[in-house]
Image: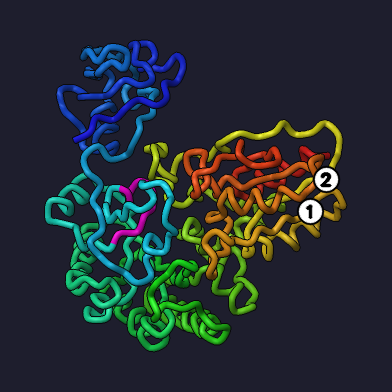
Amino acid sequence: MTAPRVTVVVRSSPADRAGIQVGDEVLALNGHRPRDVIEYQQLADGSEVEIEVKRAADSRSDLLDVRKEAGEPLGIQVSSAVFDRVRTCDNHCAFCFIYQLPKGMRKSLYLKDDDYRLSFLYGNFTTLTRFTELDAERVLTERLGPLFVSIHATDPEVRAGLLRNPKGATSLRWLRVLLDGGIEVHGQIVVCPGVNSGGVLVDTLAGILDQYPRLASVGVVPLGLSAYSHEPEMRPHTLEEAMEVCDTVSEWQGIFSTVLGRRLVYAADEYYLLAGRELPPAEHYDGFPQHENGIGMVRAFESAFWGSSVAEDGVRPGFFSWVDGAPPAGYRARRTATGGGATPPSAPRLTKVITGTYGARVLAPLLAGLGRRDVELLEVENRFFGGNIGVAGLLTGTDVAGATSSGSAEARYLLPDACLSDGRFLDGMTVTDLPRPVEVVPADGHSLRMALEGAR
């Protein structure tokens, strides 16, 4: 078990008053070594907390008495969310994006997790193939929800084939245990054309109605395929296939509404863009339960951009958001723009909004609606990953640098923070490595509108 290292100490916080410093390792709280940040927060919840730390300066151990209000945060951030080993994934899914990464990226990006704790903290989807009775007992006792579960198919044979793991045929039994125990669970179906599409998708939705009607929501999302995939059966959706998925989801929303009184299933925004269909209105998404999964994100963004009260909480600040010392509070934490940034100009000048190919289709009409000649869209093609990867969250510094290098040095560039995790792009670059200064803006409609208003 690795002791968490303190990365941030909030000034004048209980931890700061007790003398905890950046670089110290937290060995124990009240005599217990926490396994993860969940247990750590529970141990730190009281008004008196005895913390054993290993000092960064001289490696000595100190016992510190921290006094605070019950429930008041200690005022520190630690280097990781899991202090024992991350539960790695033993599936071999042909559609897994980890297998589609190019060589030479930082090692942490190649770690496949299937850890329910990261599902609770960050919204990572788990297949439950490594879930145990002890895990179920902890989740039910500590009420660790919501959790996010990859379903993909309810037919045992089909699911085992998709996961390339015989345990995939039986691991959804834990989903029933969680739901019967009153845990909020959101499901996901990654549709691979010709594998679990068409009739298999229909059977899966029927299986959900029959076996797992207590699911809070189910997201249907398309296969993401980079140029580095070596799976011949994996291919992008055709126009007709995307339209079929939209129609299937719409039909089953009607069935679920009739039987359960709620839509339950939602198609990813990407499907409507692929199919050339108008996206459903904001109220169709019933509070955006899978907003962070790219479902309803367009409508929420539009509403917030034009000043509506639609909330966009839950957006993850970047893919692979739990790696490399991401804040342990996970994607539920309040978003802040990370990385460097230029100071907004005092006089109007050309502002370029950086986004991916899918984002460009959403932002173009919004920016046009402002009627401003000093605002332009800078669409960046994802050459780093290639394939059908077009979301802004997977843009790399390499591609952003290429797109901005030939642009005006006098222009103002706005970069969505969804491109960054812990201040870095997926290829390891930072904003300071770019050829033009950029301002990092939270990837929500309200923040973008406020940043554009700052250019006036």
Query: x, y (%) of residue 147?
Result: 32, 55
Q: Is residue 78 above or below residue 453?
A: above
Residue at image coords 47%, 72%: 222
For label 1, the residue is: 376
Kindly tell me whether residue 163 is visible in this rendering: yes
In depth, the one of 112 and 262 nearer the eye is 112
Q: Which residues are magenta?
A: 118-126
> Going from the N terminus, do you reach mark 1 or mark 2 first?
2
Q: Quadrant of the C terminus?
A: top right
Query: x, y (%) of residue 66?
Result: 29, 15
Disc 1 marks a residue whose amino acid type is Glu
Disc 2 marks a residue whose amino acid type is Leu
Mark identifier at residue 350: 2
Mark identifier at residue 261: none
Q: Is residue 26 above or below residue 414?
A: above
Name the secondary structure under disc 2.
Answer: loop
Q: Residue 352: within the magenta?
A: no
